[in-house]
Amino acid sequence: MIRVAVAGAAGRMGRLIVQNVVQDEELELAQAFDVREIGKDAGEIAGVGRIGVPITDAKEMEKVLDADVLVDFTTAEAAVENIRIASQKGVKLVVGTTGFTEEHWKKIEEYCKNVPAVISPNFSVGVNIFWKLVEFAVQFLKDYDIEILEMHHRFKKDAPSGTALKAAEIIKKYLGDKKLVFGREGVCPRGDEIGVFAIRGGDIVGEHTVFFIGMGERIEITHRALSRQAFASGAIKAVKWIAKVDKPGIYGMNDVLGL
Ligand code: NAP
């Protein structure tokens, strides 16, 4: 049995991870952390009935964390702190949280020298193939104009999405240091840039399109997540994969999926 702790257990993704862990016979929910719903049963909050694991105040994590793998779907600031604690305690990590700054990444890289971690801005298998398709296309369409559009639900805190930024990073790997332009306003003729646009509204789970726009034609590569279960299934795959990895360092879904 792999003993899993979930940070952000009262959140949209955390509740789904709790559900998936409880329903998986290879996994056991050891602990649940959040800054909300403290003391309530994590199973009841996740809608799978009482499981006898209360949601513990995240402030207590440093004292009480005890699991094989910590799954983190929280906020960027919180995740950096949770990664620090897990690395100190030798608890492996699966981190889905997005919105990390360069400063955050420096700390994360330091902490992950001690512990193996899968960190991905998108755990869905489809998005990992979408990134591969973008990587394929950009190599043949270097002189096309490239723009990225992402859409998410009205409650998403960070923008643009980590998935869109990763697509931009992949494109920049082939096209050199193109400037990213986040939205346009006023007089702004197109330069040597990639435009990145974020739409927020309603309950959109997550949609991404990369446009390759030439003279007289256009290719659009689109991924649409229709349910958060796509992310949760990938995160569970990552938990089972990292549980068998001993070499510290940061891994991606590429490694988990063998892409
Ligand atoms: P959410 O519903 O806001 O859930 C986050 C939860 O974490 C909230 O309950 C939040 O409480 C709690 N939290 C805040 N600080 C904490 C701490 N120190 N320790 C433990 N819990 C803490 O957000 P979500 O939609 O689940 O998304 C969470 C993150 O995952 C976001 O960064 C999102 O972009 C990312 N995400 C990634 C993927 C992927 O595949 N990688 C997929 C979906 C979402 P408060 O609301 O009170 O702050």
Image (spheres, rainbow, N blue to C red):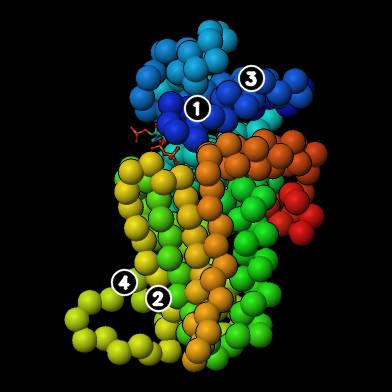
**Quick check: 103 above or below 19?**
below
At x 37% / y 53%, what residue is drawn? 158
Q: Are marks 1 and 2 in contact (CB under 8 Å)?
A: no
Where does the C terminus fall, quadrant-wise? Answer: bottom right
Between disc 4 and disc 3, whose residue precedes? 3
Going by the numbered disc 1, the residue's amino acid type is Arg
Identify the residue position indicated by label 3 in the image. Answer: 22
Residue 175 appears in view? yes
Where does the N terminus fall, quadrant-wise? Answer: top right
Task: State the separation of the CA atoms marked 4 and 2.
Answer: 7 Å
Residue 40 vs residue 91, the one in the foreground: 40
Task: State the separation of the CA atoms marked 4 and 3.
Answer: 42 Å
Q: Mark 3 vs mark 2: give the one in front.
A: 2
Q: Decide if ligand 1 comes within 8 Å of the CB at mark 1.
A: yes
Q: Mark 1 vs mark 4: give the one in front.
A: 4
Q: Are marks 3 and 2 in contact (CB under 8 Å)?
A: no
**Mark 1 secondary-structure assignment:** helix
Going by the numbered disc 2, the residue's amino acid type is Gly
**Quick check: 30 above or below 224?**
above
Identify the residue position indicated by label 1 in the image. Answer: 15
**Mark 2 secondary-structure assignment:** strand
| Label 1 Cα crowd, 10 Å radius (few <14 / some 14-19 / many 20+) | many
Task: State the separation of the CA atoms marked 1 and 2.
Answer: 34 Å
| Ligand 1's quadrant | top left
Q: Which mark is residue 183?
A: 4
Between disc 3 and disc 2, whose residue precedes? 3
Going by the numbered disc 4, the residue's amino acid type is Gly
In the visual, does 174 lie left or right of 2? left
Estimate the x, y position of residue 161 in percent, counting from the top left: 44, 57
Residue 5 vs residue 146, the one in the foreground: 146
| Label 2 Cα crowd, 10 Å radius (few <14 / some 14-19 / many 20+) | many
User: Residue placed farthest to the left in the image?
Assistant: 186
